[in-house]
Amino acid sequence: MKKRQKKLTAVILALSMLVPLPGMPAGALAQSRENTAGIRGYIAESAKEGYTAAESSLEGLEETEIADGQNLAEMEPASDAAGKVPLKGAGYAASSAGEVTPFVGDSSMAGTAAVQAAGAAVIEKDGQIIGYVDEGGLDAAFADSGNADTTITLLRNVERAGSLQIRINCTLDLGENTIRITDGSVKIPFGASVCIKGGGGIISEKDNALYVEGTADLRGGVFSGHNGVWVLSNGCLKVSEGVKVIGTVFYGLQCYSGNVVLSGGTFQNAYPRDMIYSRDKTLKDLLETGYAYFYNNQIPVTDAGLNKDQFVSWDYTSVTVKICGHEGSCRYTHTEGAPTHRRDCLACGDIKPSENCSYDVTTGKCVCVSVCLSVCLSVCLSVKIVTRLNIPCNPFLKNFLKLIILMPYYLIY
């Protein structure tokens, strides 16, 4: 009996040598594997005396701890010299308390099929990958202060039932992927500052696509929902080129804040006039200096809607913001007794109070009188031709004709 107890004790000690403890150095772990063959032989010998269960336990342990690289990796620190980073899943919310993450993948695996199959997003800071997040971990990832000032990039499309709150200062790179929400929104609460970029989108079927109560800098993406983007009273919004905002029920962009600056973006709605609504500012005051609205991305908006809270034309359902070229949107007022005029751009509000009358970006001529001068020159040329050809004509009639043709020129000057 004592002999059997001694052998049982030896088997237990052998098994304990194979179980790596959390934080065990990689070298010690490798050494335990090298001892496996000798221990297996010892247990095989013990099996002759009825210890087959012990050998069975060893085989299961070897399969789990040695063949399964995922479990091996989770026994090693996340800051391993090999550059290993965690894939944070549903248990990620507690990871800040030191909980072991379910998977560690080498940073060189970024973009591989294995990582993309498991991760919905990758977290990067200062050019280094610090983690991967599955769909179940997105809420916690966007609430973890440890992820502040990171870039979280979607690796694939994400489908959710409810809202996603981004509570930290960070960049959300959509890539070419879409966050589709059945009944909810992506929300930026007060105190958070978020940059959203990429060619993908945020789509809400039964709510607004993006709520902004904090600060949002939109540099790309499609935002489609009942309101494409709704800026609340405390919110700040900046929209740049490459953004499309679509309202499926109410407005493309709905602003209840005066802290909105538009230097790009296309705003759409199925109904005319509802591309943008601004409660606290006129539409023209939302524009960055030098920018203008263009109906259907072509026709500069110069109508009365610029001084209202929404557009007045019933002919268009899309408006784009881009740099104003002052073409077909300017009013000229000649300065009496001087070779200058005042130019007012009705689209962007730019004013040139004393512009040289010979100035024109395309022709180099005075814009405000070029048509009259062209007519006058044509008439004078015709009169000169008549004179040179000695065509009979009453001199009084010639002078009267000149006076009538030149009258608009004298009226302008």
Image (cartoon, helix red, strand yellow):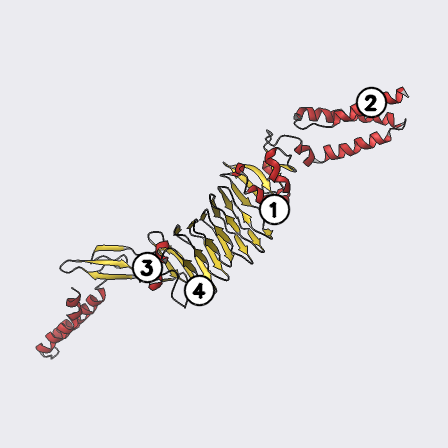
Counting residues from the N terminus, which is met first, the one under dot 2 or under dot 3? 2
User: How far, Cα to Cα, is label 2 from label 3?
Assistant: 89 Å
Badge 3 is on which residue? 347
Residue 85 in view here:
no
Where is residue 92 shown, x and y percent of the image?
61, 39
Q: Judging from the image, what secondary structure is the residue with disc 3 in? A: loop
Can you identify the residue that label 1 sits on?
A: 135
Q: Residues within 10 Å of mark 2 (few under 14, many from 20)?
A: few
> Image check: 135 left or right of 304?
right
Residue kind at label 3, given as amino acid type: Ala
How far apart in space, not on screen, are marks 3 and 4 (Cα)? 18 Å
In 3D space, how far apart are the residues under numbered discs 1 and 2 (Cα atoms)?
Answer: 46 Å
Name which residue type carries label 4.
Thr
Task: Examine the rendering and report whether any part of residue 130 can be seen.
Answer: yes
Query: Which of the two labelled residues, at mark 4 and mark 1, occupies the earlier sequence position?
Result: 1
Q: Secondary structure at mark 2?
A: helix
Quarter of the image with the C terminus is bottom left
- Residue holding disc 2: 9
Is tag 2's residue or tag 4's residue first in the polypeptide sequence? Answer: 2
Disc 1 marks a residue whose amino acid type is Glu
